[in-house]
Amino acid sequence: RASECPSHRRPVRSFLRGSMAAELVFAPGARKVTADEVAQPFIKEIEEATSALSSSARPKLVGFLANSDPAAAKYAQWTGKTFQRDGMNFELRQVEPDELDRALEEANADTSVHGIMIYYPVFGTRPSFHGGSYDDALRDTVSLAKDVEGMNHFYRRTMYRNQRFVDSEQARKCVLPCTPLAVVKVLEHLGAYDDQHPVGNRMSGKVVTVVNRSEVVGRPLAAMLANDGATVYSVDIDSTYVFLRGKVEPVPAEATTESVVKMSDVVVLAVPSDRYKMDPSWVKEGAIVVNVSSHKNIDGDILLSTRPGVRYVPAVGKITIAMLERNLLRLQQNFKGSGRLVWDSSIGCVAPAPDQ
């Protein structure tokens, strides 16, 4: 937390420029926050939950890899190692893209599988016979009882409508997309969420800029933060919109990325390109900057050395995998013993089907 940081400038590391050694010095109150720091309480929670289960009762996640993306393969490798460490079951299935539909249906019907995830992109923007992109259709193919990523139609609907439970009794919480949820946990850890306000309003008065409006990260994150009371500027390659609770509005014509960043308490960078770099001088003093992309979308050294009070999180991968594990445990608990589910369209909820 910022209050725990000394106010004087702190040397952090040495680096060489020619024959001269120099120290990187943090601006007053600036701090680099690691993913490990944020993830540790959740890792402990997960280990305690799994240790209470017999080996045969521990949930199983199946990941489908149908592309040659090195980042996807690396994420799958991290997932496997983390699950092994935490006593959970993970199986990676490598399939040809055109076989993925069938493989997903088989996993949906397999009672030994509690969670399913797909490493995207698979087809990219290739259109689907069912409408939209093929990757969108794949997301909707995953059973809501096994959608550990929270990205199928049911969970998108509940997230955007700010419906936080699967059932009308409000006993089973919805799962949320892992990376956006990881960012929320970062903000809670750093005190951006004010627990003096009721749930659903704890980001009231906060201004956030999210650079990326993908369906996997940027758009759901903007909606989640807006549903918690924030004013969220959603910046993409050719447009900027402001997300407020339950609605999206255009920004004034004179608004620029620089102008919205300069008034933001939180800046989230999620551009999947090493060519995008935000100017650190845009970040206001005391802001939180979270780099979600696998590329560094800002120069962290310049940010930390020039912007007093800033808290910079350079990566969220370990937190994302912890959220993946929590989602898997939640799905197992939510749908344990439910062979079939019924849909109540009047209230937008599901329930186990009655015995016949």
Image (cartoon, rainbow, N blue to C red):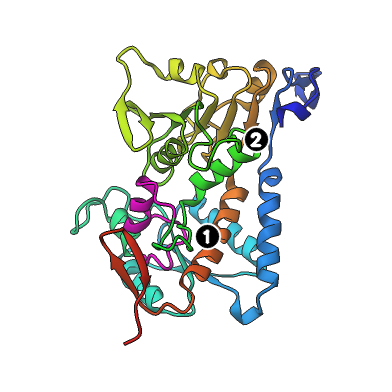
Which is nearer the eye, 353 or 147?
353
With 53 as the anchor, is 171 left or right in this view? left
- Location of the N terminus by quadrant is top right
Q: Is residue 153 magenta?
A: yes
Please name the residue shown 28% across and 47% down the image.
125
Instruction: Decide: is 299 above or below 184.
Output: above
Mark 1, secondary structure of its residue:
helix
Please name the residue shown 52% across and 28% down the image.
267
**Residue where numbered disc 2 is placed:** 190
Residue 297, numbered label = none
User: Would you identify the image quadrant in which residue 138 lies?
Assistant: bottom left
User: Would you identify the image quadrant in which residue 280 lies?
Assistant: top right
Which is nearer the eye, 20 or 318?
318
Residue 327, numbered label = 1
- Location of the C terminus by quadrant is bottom left
Please provide the residue range marked out in magenta.
Answer: 142-164
Whether residue 85 is visible to the viewer of this picture, yes or no, is no
Which is nearer the eye, 60 or 232?
232
Whichever of labels 2 and 1 marks the residue nearer the N terminus, that label is 2
Number of other residues with Cα within 10 Å of mark 1, as a class: few under 14, some 14 to 19, many 20 or more:
many
Q: Main secondary structure of the magenta part?
A: loop
